[in-house]
Image (tube, helix red, strand yellow):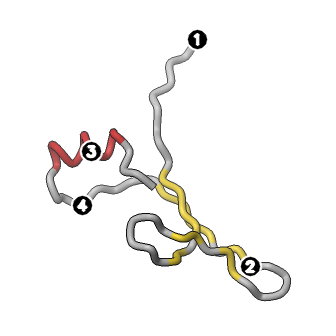
Amino acid sequence: MATPDFIRTLRASAGQQLLFLPVVSAIVFYDDGRVLLAHRADNGRWSIRWHLFVLRSCHPS
């Protein structure tokens, strides 16, 4: 997964400070005991599935 633009913007001002971001991960098991994994494009390793939520501002109508 490529780094989203809003993370690049945060990094430009925050540097290497710790960022708290909304992320969810899950371990999915098949009935036969296999585990669903994702093949990472950045380092070629296998990992559990995860997703970074991209927050957008909401304006009431």
The answer to whether residue 37 is above or below residue 11 is below
The residue under label 3 is 8
The residue under label 1 is 61
Q: 44 or 25, which lies in front?
A: 44
Badge 2 marks a residue whose secondary structure is strand
Measure how far apart labels 3 and 2 are at the Cα level: 34 Å
The residue under label 2 is 29
Measure how far apart labels 1 and 3 are at the Cα level: 30 Å
Measure how far apart labels 4 and 3 are at the Cα level: 14 Å
For residue 18, the mark is 4
Work out whether mark 3 precedes mark 2 in sequence or the reverse, and give the earlier one: 3
Badge 4 marks a residue whose secondary structure is loop
State yes or no: discs 1 and 3 in contact (Cβ < 8 Å).
no
Work out whether mark 1 precedes mark 3 in sequence or the reverse, and give the earlier one: 3
Left or right of 28 on screen, residue 30: right
State yes or no: discs 3 and 2 in contact (Cβ < 8 Å).
no
The amino acid at mark 1 is Ser
Badge 1 marks a residue whose secondary structure is loop
The amino acid at mark 2 is Phe
